[in-house]
Image (cartoon, rainbow, N blue to C red):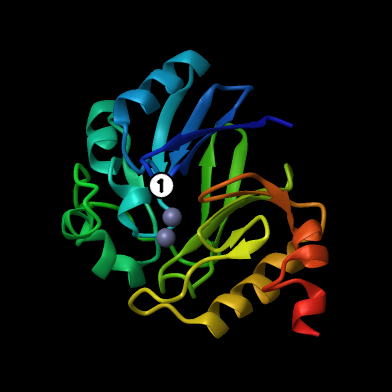
Amino acid sequence: MPLKAAVIPVTPLQQNCTLMWCDETMKGVIIDPGNEVDTIIEAVGEVGIKVERILLTHGHFDHVGGAMDLSERLHAPIFGPHHDDEFITTAVVKAGTFYNLPGGRDVAGNTWLSDGDTVTFGNVTLDVIHTPGHTPGHVVYYSASAKLAQVGDVLFQGSIGRTDFPRGDLNTLIHSITAKLWPLGNDVTFIPGHGPNSTFGRERATNPYVGDAALA
Ligand SMILES: [Zn+2]
Ligand SMILES: [Zn+2]
């Protein structure tokens, strides 16, 4: 299994910036560099990978704030999220000011992703799954061979993403989780945007919002 992953919590919101790499080629990606670019670059150096792309799950400032600096310093292009998050990725500075967590930059020049796209680094391929609800352009990155997903703010251990932000929608989020994530299998491990990992099976059994019992 060539896919390896490491999580670097960044920002006061403890957002899970994730390094994923192919240990056969040591080529990798950085998912959701919310900020603290120096810390992320240090971690990249410790693991010893060549970062080929920066991937974004959705446009919220705590997930994308460091993307432009990192892209420039590592000469790595930015991919994602889905185009429907453009109104958020282009308002990062505004959001940082609003939440009194400045330092991020608006995202520009990124390649938008769509449901069914794939992202490859070394011998690893990630599937792109469009999962709206928390934000309209949220995507999940999934490795079928490793049974590992980075789900951003769609799903958490014991919770789900907030839907009270502009263009958030609870029913859409629940549909994204039950129709697009659950079919991937109970044995899929996921890294959420904040907090500890879990598996889809564990959440189906215990999650008070989207567990099988909650939706029955
Ligand atoms: Zn978010
Ligand atoms: Zn978040």
Where does residue 20 sit, x and y in percent of width and height?
A: 55, 35
Determine whether the beta carbon of the residue marked 1 sits less than 8 angstroms from the nearest atom of ligand 2: yes
Quadrant where ligand 2 appears: bottom left
Viewport quadrant of the N terminus: top right
The image quadrant of residue 125 is top right
Viewport quadrant of the C terminus: bottom right
208, above or below 56, in the image: below
Residue 127 relative to residue 93: left or right: right
Where does residue 82 sit, x and y in percent of width and height?
A: 40, 65
The image quadrant of residue 157 is bottom right
18, above or below 22, in the image: below
| Residue 189 in view (yes/no) | no
112, above or below 170, in the image: above
Residue 72 relative to residue 16: left or right: left
Front in this rendered view, residue 137 or 76: 137
Q: Amino acid at mark 1?
A: Leu
Where does residue 52 sit, x and y in percent of width and height?
A: 41, 33
* Mark 1, other Cα within 10 Å: few <14 / some 14–19 / many ≥20: some
Q: Secondary structure at mark 1?
A: loop
Where does residue 73 sit, x and y in percent of width and height?
A: 24, 27
| Residue 180 in view (yes/no) | yes
Which residue is labeled 1 in the image?
13
The residue depicted at 32 percent of the width and 55 percent of the height is 111
The image quadrant of residue 202 is bottom right
The residue depicted at 20 percent of the width and 60 percent of the height is 98
Q: How many marks?
A: 1
The residue depicted at 30 percent of the width and 54 percent of the height is 61
